[in-house]
Image (spheres, rainbow, N blue to C red):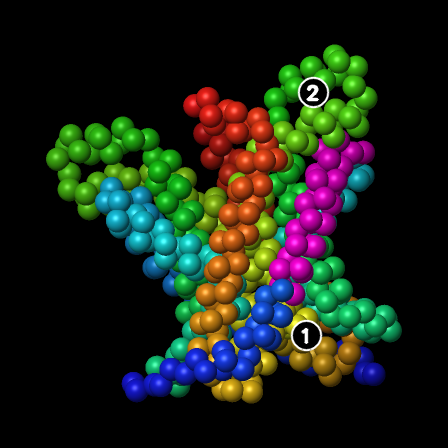
Amino acid sequence: MDYQFDFSFLLNNWRDILDGVWLTVRMSAVSIVLGVMFGAAFAVVRVYGPRWAAKTVAWYVDIIRNTPLVIQAFWIFFGLAALQFRVPALTAAIFALVVNVVAYTTEIIRAGIESIPKGQLEAAECLGLPRWRVILHVILPQAIEKMYPSLISQCVLMMLATSIMSQISAEELTAIGYRIQSETFRGFEIYIVLAVVYLALSWLLRLIMEQGAYYAFPRRRRLNANR
Amino acid sequence: MQGLTIDHIFFIFKGAGWTIILSAMGFIGGTILGLPIALARSSRNKWIRRISGFVVQVVQGIPLPVIMFVVYFGISVAGFDLPAIVAAGLALTAYAGAYLGEIWKGCIQAVPRTQWEAADCLALTPLQTAAFVILPQAARIAVPPTVGFLVQIVKNSSYAVVIGVFDLTYSSRVVNNSTFEPFLVFTIAAIIYFAMCYPLSSLASRLERKFKKS
């Protein structure tokens, strides 16, 4: 094997790659924020909501978690096109990602809610707090704090999942890589570069979220300091 | 615009068959790769632990479509001429190996420490300890999460569409391109995927509950 590695495409295309990174970052950020918000709301419905609503959420979670993201994205993207809705690929991509990630965060936060000792709820009720404030100020913060490590992993997976949106022509990092590949025919090198970039992005995201936890959960910080 | 014919449905099902084959390749390869990774991750040697942990983190930090591309182009760069499904199978192997390795590492560590000590007292070698004491106990704990991960493998085999592997995702997209009935076609595809994944996930959660009780 005498293959000549050639990374010279980086000289001409680094701007495009940066554009792709930026779009991937924006897509991930929007999807993560929306995903965690809706996930928390759905998890509350799943645990405290009326029976029919809880059942509906459970079905939604089951359906989404047992079908691939690509199919969901195709369904939304091509489906909207068939209905004569001309949405940009990026909007459809974010929509598909949010629909997907909400199912996972719902399950994670629900597990967190169910692990909160009953005493917390009773104590809050003794203080005379209305139900919604108990959930919002007592249950949810503790549930999210407890499940934070799983949420970080889910968000990293989510960031990586944006790569498949190149299939519905969202111009994120993988799509840029594909375009450069078809112009320069240096497929192996290009995807090694992409792999390194994604690796850096996922480590960065993990770092940011772990640092964020340090400020978001002062209680955990105190507990760790005492140990 | 043209309706969906019975031939189209057959074509979609043909893709589903390849999805099953591809998932099986990923699971078998992932098992072969995941076992040594799990053992290395729970090794007593600090460096073996660190290096295997680094490898796992690298694989988990790269999106599966990009792994698919790297393997696909890597095979051709290495001078082999293999069908795309082999590349997809190898990429799934790397992916499943990393995740199964981490899952099984957790199961190995869930075996009580005293078991290791007892094996030490019986003067078993590390290999004997692993094979006859720890792994049989860890395997019991590992069944539910492994079945659960099978769902991920089936679902994520759909990413092979990026390198043009003929599977359920690919065949349904082809049918959509010729009929342009996206809701119907992708609903059928989703139902087939669901029919493959849902029994596995409910089996996984049933097993989990059963093991928790005992």
Numbered badge on residue A102: none
In the picture of the structure, the residue carrying the numbered disc 2 is: A121
In this rendering, is residue A204 above or below A19? above
Which marked residue is nearer to the observer: mark 1 or mark 2? Answer: 1
Query: Disc 1 marks which amino acid?
Result: Ser
**Callout count:** 2
User: Residue B212 at x, y = what percent?
Assistant: 49, 32
Do callouts 1 and 2 mark residues in contact (Cβ within 8 Å)? no
Nearer the observer, B10 or A77: A77
Q: Which residues are magenta?
A: A23-50
Please give the name of the residue rendered at 58% of the width and 29% of the height, measured from the top-left corner: A218
The reply to whether residue B83 is in sight is no
> Which badge, 1 or 2, is on the more N-terminal residue?
2
> On the image, which quarter does residue A130 sit in?
top right
Instruction: Kindly indicate whether the residues beneath marks 1 and 2 are on one polypeptide chain.
Output: yes
Please give the name of the residue rendered at 58% of the width and 74% of the height, measured from the top-left corner: A15
